[in-house]
Image (tube, rainbow, N blue to C red):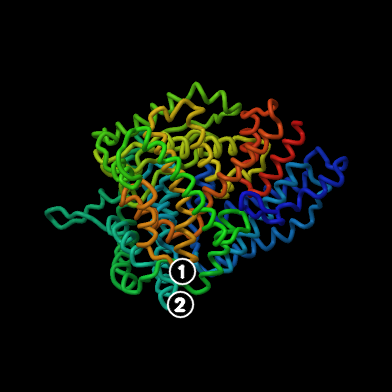
């Protein structure tokens, strides 16, 4: 079946056949055996990746950092998903209620994608890149202001033990990258050049007049600067000594070794090409990445064509805004003007940027009731991105804990507030914060009707598709009264449309980094530096950038379908609840769910 260019896999329809043929046979009670099976699956996943447990607010494994790169770990992971996929067949559809049938289909997809990923060497031989990899996550945790708690003696001891495991991972990462060079798995040079300063910043130390090394300015020393006041003086001294020692004896030497390796051997071996198709088995990997990130069976050619069509459509909308503000010149001239317009850069320091986001939130609060019946209880805050990763980072959302004790965080990179251009801030807040990721993720985590494993799942087509969809809700929420902010929304949608073109261009059509950069410069108002960072992001994680527009188009299609079918009965609050209540699911499952809701609502 093909709708809006989205070919949806029939594998997802496995849970619907019984519903259609034997509706009277669908049980309403929980299948306790299946419920226990789902609980065991979730527990197993948390043990496989204790960092995910930490971010979910489950602190049982805070002292563990497995060597994700070891052969033993890779085999253990493969065995886990193989075992659960096989056991899933023991649960027949007719023994499961509707929600459980959905969970069965989701778990089957989860296992299928994990096993498909394990057939490639990318995760093992590309352990580090400039934006996505676990070393950056560890830097976030090390700051002492992220998901890893630093309030008790146990917390501080847990982090020390986790750092022991991280040191092993760092050594393995260097070894695996050397193996990658030998086998033809090496990053493009431009990406390597962005990684080098990240590691160099972690090696910097100072010496006093007597030559004694001072590590107090190192990022990983940050928890010592935040030692709780209720710690005894002996405990404070002990942890200061231990954290200093692990920096001097383990972490800094590992960071130095990696930094030297990256600057010399790895950079020399770096690829001149940009796309993943140039590594061994790269073409097959990109096909897998498309399916994994879009949850569809679309081809690279189909996505590329769709992207070109969306770019053309949005350009025509941008022309209207250019005329509205009275700009004389071409649209490309208008892009340049918006990028460099000092009136759109009114800030003197980072706090003013953050204040503006909070003001956007206050402005839209009265309108949220009209669009959403359910709102999350989990608190929400806006923070500036940490300095160590700010230069290569984009705005992002980090979920709160499952129990709501840790707030959801909207991180904003502000390297220089005086050059921060805020023309996209309203759309950015809608996407990353409210009602985008914060609503979508928090409502999922707070939904007690979902099994635990579905509360922390992430399918990019649904998650990023929802967030991009919410950018179009701005006018309904009282925003976009300034034409430049509406142009900013169009710019962000254009950004995601361009991704369809350049991601497939780079990884399937032989485009160079420079060609992709120029295409972006020609069709959007993002800054030159921002565009370069984005193109290199796509180079580092093939396929991920496709998920936004694919998911958005499907949700918009379903909304239009529901509105046409229900007419005056259509309630936007109910539609949004139907989309959000099941959490992250593949797009075909979402489509099936909405179609059933439409029929029921009639």
The quarter of the image holding the C terminus is top right
Query: 128 or 170, which is in the foreground?
Result: 128
Q: Secondary structure at mark 1?
A: helix
Q: Element under label 2?
A: helix
Above or below — where is 209 with respect to 512?
above
Q: Nearer the viewer, residue 122 or 600?
A: 600
Circles 1 and 2 in contact, beta carbons < 8 Å? yes
Q: Which residue is mark 2?
A: 183
Residue 325: where, in percent of width, then height? 34, 33
The residue lying furthest to the top in this view is: 366
Residue closer to the observer: 304 or 356:
304
How would you rate the neighbour count of disc 2 (Cα within 10 Å): few for under 14, some for 14-19, many for 20 or more?
Answer: few
Q: Left or right: 526 with respect to 440?
A: left
Q: Tell me the CA gap for discs 1 and 2.
A: 9 Å
Q: State the residue position of label 1.
A: 125
Give neighbour class at mark 1: few <14, some 14-19, many 20+ (Cα, 10 Å). many
**Residue found at the very far left of the displayed protein:** 209
Q: Position of residue 410 (x, y in %)?
A: 42, 38
Q: Position of residue 80 (x, y in %)?
A: 64, 61
> Does the image show residue 235?
no
**Residue 267 position within the rendered picture, expressed as x and y whole percent measured from the top left:** 32, 70
In the depicted view, which residue is nearer to us: 405 or 63? 405
Which numbered marker is on residue 523? Answer: none
Query: Could you tell whether 480 is left or right of 348 in the image?
Result: right
Q: Quadrant of the N terminus?
A: bottom right
Residue visible at 70% across and 26% down? 569
Observer able to see residue 321: yes
Q: Earlier in the sequence, mark 1 or mark 2?
A: 1
Q: How many marks?
A: 2
């Amino acid at each position: 079946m093909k709708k809006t260019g989205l070919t949806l896999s029939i594998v997802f329809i496995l849970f619907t056949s019984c519903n259609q043929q034997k509706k009277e046979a669908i049980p309403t009670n929980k299948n306790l055996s299946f419920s226990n099976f789902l609980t065991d699956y979730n527990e197993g996943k948390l043990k496989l990746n204790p960092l995910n447990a930490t971010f979910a607010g489950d602190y049982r494994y805070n002292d563990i950092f497995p060597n994700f790169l070891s052969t033993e770990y890779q085999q253990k992971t493969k065995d886990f998903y193989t075992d659960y996929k096989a056991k899933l067949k023991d649960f027949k559809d007719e023994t499961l209620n509707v929600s459980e049938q959905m969970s069965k289909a989701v778990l089957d997809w989860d296992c299928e994608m994990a096993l498909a990923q394990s057939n490639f060497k990318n995760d093992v031989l590309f352990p580090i890149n400039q934006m996505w990899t676990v070393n950056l996550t560890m830097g976030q945790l090390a700051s002492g202001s992220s998901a890893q708690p630093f309030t008790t003696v146990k917390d501080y001891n847990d982090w020390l033990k986790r750092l022991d495991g991280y040191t092993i991972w760092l050594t393995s990462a260097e070894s695996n990258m050397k193996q990658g060079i030998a086998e033809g798995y090496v990053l493009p040079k431009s990406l390597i050049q962005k990684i080098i300063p990240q590691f160099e910043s972690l090696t910097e130390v100072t010496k006093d007049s007597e030559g004694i090394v001072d590590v107090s300015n190192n990022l990983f020393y940050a928890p010592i600067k935040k030692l709780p006041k209720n710690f005894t003086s002996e405990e404070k001294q002990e942890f200061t000594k231990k954290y200093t020692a692990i920096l001097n004896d383990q972490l800094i030497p590992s960071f130095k070794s990696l930094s030297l390796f990256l600057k010399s051997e790895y950079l020399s071996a770096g690829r001149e090409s940009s796309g993943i198709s140039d590594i061994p088995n790269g073409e097959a990997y990109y096909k897998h990445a498309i399916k994994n990130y879009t949850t569809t069976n679309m081809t690279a050619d189909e996505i590329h064509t769709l992207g070109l069509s969306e770019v053309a459509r949005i350009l025509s909308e941008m022309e209207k805004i250019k005329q509205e503000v009275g700009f004389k010149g071409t649209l490309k001239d208008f892009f340049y003007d918006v990028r460099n317009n000092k009136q759109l850069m009114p800030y003197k320091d980072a706090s003013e940027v953050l204040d503006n986001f909070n003001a956007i939130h206050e402005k839209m609060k009265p309108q949220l009731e009209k669009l959403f019946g359910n709102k999350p209880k989990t608190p929400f805050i806006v923070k500036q991105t940490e300095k160590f990763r700010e230069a290569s980072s984009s705005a992002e959302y980090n979920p709160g804990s499952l129990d709501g004790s840790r707030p959801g965080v909207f991180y904003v990179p502000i390297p220089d507030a005086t050059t921060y251009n805020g023309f996209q801030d309203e759309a950015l807040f809608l996407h990353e914060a409210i009602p985008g990721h914060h609503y979508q993720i928090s409502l999922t985590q707070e939904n007690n009707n979902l099994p635990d494993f579905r509360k922390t799942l992430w399918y990019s087509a649904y998650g990023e598709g929802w967030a991009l969809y919410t950018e179009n809700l701005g006018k309904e929420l009282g925003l976009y009264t300034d034409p430049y902010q509406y142009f900013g929304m169009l710019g962000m949608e254009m950004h995601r449309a361009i991704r369809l073109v350049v991601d497939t261009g780079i990884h399937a059509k032989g485009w160079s980094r420079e060609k992709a950069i120029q295409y972006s410069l020609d069709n959007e108002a993002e800054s030159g530096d921002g565009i370069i960072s984005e193109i290199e992001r796509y180079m580092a994680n093939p396929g991920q950038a496709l998920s936004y527009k694919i998911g958005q188009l499907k949700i918009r299609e379903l909304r239009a379908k529901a509105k046409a079918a229900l007419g005056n009965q259509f309630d936007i609050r109910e539609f949004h609840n139907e989309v959000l209540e099941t959490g992250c699911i593949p797009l075909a499952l979402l489509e099936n769910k909405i179609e059933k809701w439409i029929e029921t609502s009639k």
